[in-house]
Image (spheres, grey):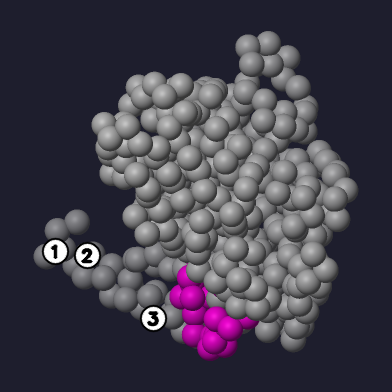
C-alpha cells in the first residue's frame, strides 16, 4: 500500500491501538514471563496445562507426552498465536523439566505463527520458591524479582565445551563439601565428557532446533549436590553409528544405548579411537562416587542408583539428552 | 625434559579439538607436548609429563594429546613408549589409560 493511501493511514492507526490493547491485556493478566516477537498482532491464546508432577526424572511419560503433544499441536495449528503455560497447579517441580521448558520456549520461534509465550509461577510456595531461586528466570523476560541464588545453586548455559565452567562447578562442590580439588577430578572428567558429547553430537543433524545450547544446573541441599545437564538436540540414539544390518532391522533403542555405554564401536564419527566418553561416564558412576546417575535420551532411561543398574524404554520420547547426578556428603566422608 | 600440565598449559584441560573449545588436547599437543618430545629426543633424555594438580581430564583430551602424537604427528610408537614417563599421584589410573591410547593409536 502507498503511504498517501487513506487505507494505509487507517491501518497504522489500527495497528497502534492493537499494540496498546495487547500491552494492556498482558498487564491485566499479570504475566510472569514472556517471549515477545516484534510487530505483535492480536493473539488467539492457547492455554497449555503443565503436568502437576513436573519432572522428567520422576514422571517422564506424562511430561514427555505433554511436550510432544504441544509441539505437534503447534506445528499443525495456525490459529493460536500465543501460549499461556498454566503452571499454577504444579505440586512437584525439578530442574530437568524446568530446563526442558526453557529450551522449548527458546525454540518457540520455529513455529512462525507464534508471537507470544508466557506463564505464571506455581501456586505452591515450595515450587514457586524453587523457580524463583533456580536462576532460570534470568533467561526469560520477567518482572519477577529473583532471589540471589548463587550461594546454593549454580547455573551455566553454553554452546561450546567450556572447561572453565566445569572448573567453577568443581569449586562450587568442593566449597559445599569442604574437600580439596583432587576430590572432584572424577566429576570434572564426567561433566567434561557429557558437555563434550553435547557440543559435538547433539546438534550435528541439520533439522535441529535453532537454540543450540547445553544447560548445566547444580543445587546444594541437605548435604547433597544435585547436578542436571541437558541439551535439546537429537539424542544419543539418533546420533549413534548403526551397523549395516541394524539400519534394516533396527534393534530396540535400549540395546543400542547399552552397546554405546559398553564402549562398542558406536562413535558417530566412525573412528575407532573415539567413543571413550560414554563408557567413562558409566565406569565413574559404577565406582559409587555418585549415589545416583540417571541418563535419559530419546525414549530410554538408564540409571545407576547405589551401584544398581537399570534400563527402561518408554513409550514417549524427548528431543535431547538429560543427565542427572547426585553426590552425597556423608558418602564422601565414609570413603 | 620435564613438563607439568598445570603450569605449562592449564589447570582445566578441555576437549579434543581446538574448534570444540578452549585448552584442547590438540592445542596441548601442538604447542607443548610435541615440542617437548622433540627436545627430549634430540638430547637423548626421558620426557617426564606431570599430570597432577589440575581439575581433571577429558578422556578425549588424553587420547588426542598422546594418541595424536602417533596418529597425527607420526611419532614412533615404540620410541614414545620407551621415552615417556608419566607422573600422576592424584589419579594413578591415568598412566594406564594414556599408555593404552598410545598403543591403540
- Which numbered mark, 1 or 3, is in the foreground of this view? 3
Determine the chain carrying the residue at label 3.
Answer: A
Q: Give the percent coordinates (x, y) of residue A107.
A: 49, 54
Q: Is residue B12 visible?
A: yes
Residue at (11% x, 65% y) in the render: A4
The image quadrant that residue A2 belongs to is bottom left
Q: Give the percent coordinates (x, y) of residue B15.
A: 45, 46
The image quadrant that residue A118 belongs to is bottom right
Q: Cα distance, mark 1 to mark 3? A: 22 Å
Magenta residue check for A94: no
The answer to whether residue A11 is above or below residue A268 is below
Q: Is residue A115 visible?
A: no
Which range is magenta? Answer: A137-158
Residue at (86% x, 55% y) in the render: A306
Q: Secondary structure at mark 3?
A: helix
- Labels in figure, total: 3
Q: Cα distance, mark 2 to mark 1? A: 6 Å
Towards the viewer: A310 or A30: A310
| Residue receiving disc 3 | A20
| Residue receiving disc 2 | A8
Determine the chain carrying the residue at label 1.
Answer: A
Q: Is residue A203 left or right of residue A98?
A: left
| Residue receiving disc 1 | A3
* Residues indicated by labels 1 and 3 sit on the same polypeptide chain: yes
On-image quarter of the N terminus of chain A? bottom left
Q: Cα distance, mark 2 to mark 3? A: 19 Å
Do the numbered discs 2 and 1 sit on residues whose CB atoms are within 8 Å?
Answer: yes
Q: For the residue carrying disc 3, how many other residues have a C-alpha within 10 Å: few (<14), some (14-19), or many (20+)?
A: few
Determine the chain carrying the residue at label 2.
Answer: A
Amino acid at each position: 500500500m502507498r503511504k498517501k493511501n487513506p487505507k494505509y493511514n487507517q491501518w497504522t492507526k489500527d495497528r497502534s491501538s492493537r499494540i496498546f490493547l495487547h500491552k494492556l491485556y498482558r498487564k491485566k493478566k499479570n504475566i510472569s514471563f514472556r517471549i515477545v516477537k516484534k510487530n505483535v498482532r492480536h493473539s488467539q491464546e492457547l492455554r497449555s496445562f503443565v503436568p502437576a508432577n513436573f519432572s522428567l526424572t520422576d514422571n517422564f511419560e506424562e511430561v514427555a507426552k505433554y511436550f510432544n503433544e504441544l509441539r505437534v499441536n503447534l506445528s499443525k495449528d495456525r490459529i493460536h498465536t500465543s501460549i499461556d503455560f498454566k503452571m499454577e497447579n504444579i505440586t512437584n517441580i525439578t530442574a530437568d523439566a524446568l530446563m526442558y521448558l526453557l529450551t522449548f520456549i527458546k525454540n518457540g520461534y520455529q513455529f512462525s505463527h507464534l508471537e507470544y509465550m508466557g506463564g505464571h509461577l506455581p501456586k505452591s510456595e515450595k515450587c514457586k520458591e524453587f523457580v524463583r531461586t533456580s536462576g532460570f528466570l534470568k533467561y526469560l523476560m520477567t518482572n519477577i524479582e529473583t532471589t540471589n541464588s548463587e550461594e546454593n545453586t549454580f547455573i551455566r548455559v553454553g554452546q561450546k565445551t567450556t572447561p572453565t565452567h566445569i572448573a567453577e562447578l568443581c569449586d562450587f562442590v568442593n566449597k559445599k563439601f569442604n574437600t580439596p580439588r583432587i576430590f572432584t577430578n572424577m566429576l570434572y572428567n564426567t561433566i567434561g565428557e557429557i558437555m563434550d558429547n553435547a557440543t559435538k553430537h547433539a546438534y550435528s543433524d541439520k533439522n535441529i532446533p535453532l537454540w543450540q545450547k547445553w544447560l548445566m544446573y547444580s543445587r546444594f541441599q541437605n548435604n547433597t549436590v544435585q547436578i542436571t545437564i541437558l541439551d535439546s538436540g537429537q539424542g544419543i540414539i539418533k546420533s549413534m553409528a548403526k551397523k549395516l544390518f541394524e539400519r534394516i532391522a533396527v534393534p530396540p533403542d535400549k540395546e543400542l544405548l547399552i552397546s554405546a555405554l559398553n564402549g562398542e564401536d558406536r562413535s558417530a564419527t566412525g573412528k575407532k579411537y573415539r567413543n571413550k566418553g560414554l563408557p567413562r561416564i558409566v565406569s565413574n558412576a559404577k565406582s559409587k562416587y555418585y549415589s545416583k546417575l540417571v541418563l535419559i535420551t530419546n525414549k530410554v532411561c538408564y540409571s545407576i542408583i547405589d551401584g544398581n543398574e537399570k534400563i527402561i524404554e518408554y513409550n514417549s520420547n524427548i528431543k535431547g539428552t538429560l543427565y542427572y547426578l547426585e553426590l552425597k556428603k556423608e558418602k564422601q566422608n565414609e570413603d | 625434559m620435564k613438563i607439568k600440565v598445570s603450569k605449562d598449559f592449564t589447570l582445566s584441560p578441555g576437549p579434543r579439538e581446538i574448534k570444540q573449545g578452549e585448552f584442547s588436547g590438540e592445542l596441548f599437543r601442538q604447542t607443548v607436548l610435541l615440542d617437548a618430545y622433540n627436545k627430549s629426543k634430540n638430547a637423548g633424555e626421558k620426557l617426564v609429563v606431570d599430570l597432577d594438580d589440575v581439575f581433571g581430564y577429558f578422556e578425549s583430551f588424553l587420547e588426542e594429546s598422546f594418541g595424536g602424537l602417533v596418529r597425527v604427528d607420526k611419532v614412533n610408537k615404540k620410541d614414545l613408549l620407551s621415552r615417556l614417563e608419566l607422573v600422576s599421584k592424584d589419579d594413578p589410573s591415568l598412566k594406564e589409560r594414556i599408555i593404552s591410547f598410545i598403543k591403540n593409536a
